[in-house]
Image (cartoon, rainbow, N blue to C red):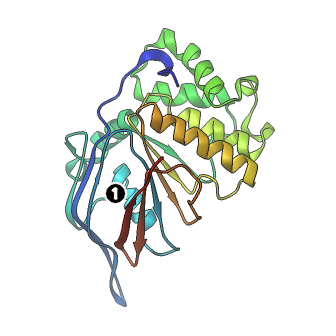
Amino acid sequence: MENIGGYTGLTGFIQLNQVSRWFESASGRFEALKNIDLHIGQGSHVAIVGKSGSGKSTLLNMLTGIDHPSEGTVRINSTEVHTLNESSLAKWRGKNVGIVFQFFQLVPTLTVAENILLAMDFVNVIPVRERARRAGELLSLVGIPQHAGKLPAGLSGGEQQRAAIARALANDPPILVADEPTGNLDSNTTGIILNLFTELAGAGKTVIVVTHEKVSSAGYDRVITLRDGAVVADTNRER
């Protein structure tokens, strides 16, 4: 896969050291994550799996800077993410992490191409004169260039997810994180999406997929299993 647009992000290296996250409530402390030590290298294709309540979403929030650990450190691309304020976090996230959500979260009043352009406008990394061309190239990359001028409602679920992936790649982030990206898709579309993630990892992106589904044939080179907020298995696999 070619590097679309020729823009190069930072090295996708992630380090979580002794990360714990707990929440206080009237019934006491709930520990969502417990002493997580996790290092993920550039170009890795990683699945984080576990049942509902295992800590997957909380770990995702650590990786993307959406939440901070109660204890421990989160270092991504030499940046100590847990120390950034909200303004700095927004800028950092826009340049370094693309997020693909289960329910797409495309702006419904904007066309597919405009959704991608909006992501570029927000971060202001891609030169203005290059943005329309890059949006078209990204839609070609995910296989839906014919839908550039359509509103999200005019696309199938799988097409919307591909549009969401194109938007997540808008600023060429070194890290792509997908949160249950195939939970609402049929088996054929699921295969297309997972193959695309494999290709992106092969091109140098660090791709992390958070899922409760089986991953036996999904092409991951590493599977991390969570249970009750702790890593209970970390398996390297041949891609």
Q: What percent of the width, then of the height, locates residue 26?
A: 36, 88
Along the horizontal axis of the image, is 17 left or right of 111? Answer: left
Residue located 41% across and 57% down the image: 60
Q: What percent of the width, then of the height, locates residue 24?
A: 31, 80
Residue located 67% across and 32% down the image: 110
Residue located 48% across and 70% down the image: 50
Q: Is residue 85 above or below residue 204?
A: below
- Mark 1, residues whose alpha carbon is within 10 Å: few (<14), some, or many (≥20)? many
Query: Farthest residue in the top direction?
Result: 129
Q: Is residue 126 above or below residue 236?
A: above
Which residue is nearer to you in this view: 224 or 65? 224
- Specify the quadrant of the image occupied by residue 155: top right
Along the horizontal axis of the image, is 107 left or right of 226? Answer: right
Residue located 33% across and 36% down the image: 91
Dot 1: what SS?
helix
Q: What percent of the width, then of the height, locates residue 113?
A: 64, 25
Q: What percent of the width, then of the height, locates residue 234?
A: 36, 64
Along the horizontal axis of the image, is 193 left or right of 228? Answer: right
What is the three-letter code of the residue carrying label 1?
Met
- Find disc 1 in the rendering and name its residue: 62
Instruction: Tell me how many marks there are.
Output: 1
Q: Is residue 94 above or below residue 183?
A: above
Query: Farthest residue in the front direction?
Result: 238
Q: Is residue 85 above or below residue 145?
A: below
